[in-house]
Amino acid sequence: MQSRLAALADRNQHVAPFQTMELVKQAQALEMQGRSVIHMSIGEPDFTAPEPVVRAMQQALKAGRSQYTAALGLHGLREAVAAHYALTEGLDVDPDCIIITAGASAALTLACLALVNPGDEVLLTDPSYPCNRHFVAAAGGVPQTVSVDATSRFQLNAGLIASHWSTATRGVLLASPANPTGTSMRWSDVCESITAVQSRGGFVIMDEIYQGLRYGDASAGIPATPHSALHASGDLVICNSFSKTFHMTGWRLGWLVVPRPWVPAFEKLQQNLFICASALAQQAALGCFTEESQAIIAERKAQFQARRDCIVPGLRRIGFDIPLIPDGAFYVWANIKAFGMESSLFTRRMLQETGVSIVPGADFGRTQAQDWVRFSYARPLAVIEEALDRIQSWLA
């Protein structure tokens, strides 16, 4: 008797394919055919973990420190994160309010499961990181995207929040600096947005995973110094990660800062869904906060800024419309309307005909998705210059 597979859950119909990863597969297939491909699609630093982190991992492995940790994470690592806030931002963060997670994805999953009821609407920007919508949907919530543009730095503000808030709205998920635009919220907008949400009884989740990769934009009054939303309020959820600033993407390690009354609920979810973050990755992460590691991170951040200062004028010279200088992360959000091609076709042709891999805007939202593409400049300067030469020749 032939068995019949049961139907998959309906939620699968609401999760769109991640086009970035599909393009990466296509680019890798071209490389296997012997083609030269410049990868400017995936959002991953080309640097790897600093040497002190590697040494800490080796020592932990040799000592056998690989058993489960407490669900909230190693207490020493939570203290180290708190000390990092104190050193870099002058913030007094209670280590007991810090939760070590299996990457920022697990952190945002926990936050949405803890705060979102089925049917609750959560406001997000369009464009935004595509997985953020799915974290909300996985909790049974409804991601309510708000079209933003250069006038608001591609960010939400108090006015947009007020005009899109409904009786079903439960909170907002913000990101500063943001993916795919690389732009940060003005500090006044951070404070006013938090007030707008909290005055309506809503929650704020602030994604700050690129906070350690801020270069600023003096022309727009955006400083290069980190400034966590915790300066504005302690009654919100902060998400951060070791992946971007500390170049530990595959180590899958992040953290949350949550209000003390919410810690038990988050701990219960962590215990049941993840048990704990990787013990070895946590032991290794202790090496992030040494003077040696911090010096390495600072030098690499300067390299990222130099890359930004190369690619933005280079793309503008070729004909891309870049309305805002990205002040953080390692992305450029560029308009291609002048080239007369929608973004999915544009990126496919660019990959096939030039060997340069970038991402179409359709991955990041619906509004004007076909007019925008994202470049990741997490590549050496020489590689960026080669990519610019290829693209210029192709468009000519």
Image (cartoon, rainbow, N blue to C red):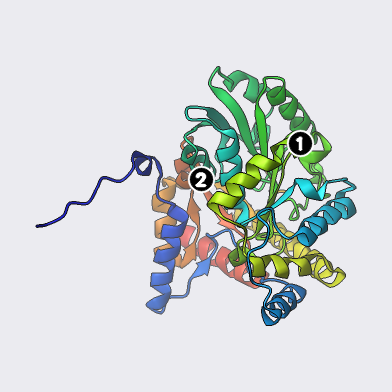
Q: 67 above or below 271? A: below
Residue at (84, 51) in percent of width and height = 85
Residue 129: percent from left, percent from top: 55, 46
* Residue type highlighted by circle 1: Arg
* Residue type highlighted by circle 2: Pro
Q: 206 above or below 270? A: above
Q: Which mark, residue 130?
A: 2
Residue 282: percent from left, percent from top: 69, 65
Residue 13 visible (yes or no): yes
Dot 2: few (<14), some (14–19), or many (≥20) neighbours within 10 Å? many
Q: Which residue is mark 1?
A: 186
Q: Is residue 16 left or right of residue 177?
A: left
Q: Which of the pair 225/229 is nearer the observer?
A: 229
Q: Which of the pair 174/240 is nearer the observer?
A: 240
Determine the secondary structure under disc 2.
helix
Q: Is residue 362 left or right of residue 317?
A: left
Determine the secondary structure under disc 1.
loop
Residue 83: percent from left, percent from top: 86, 55
Residue at (75, 33) in percent of width and height = 235
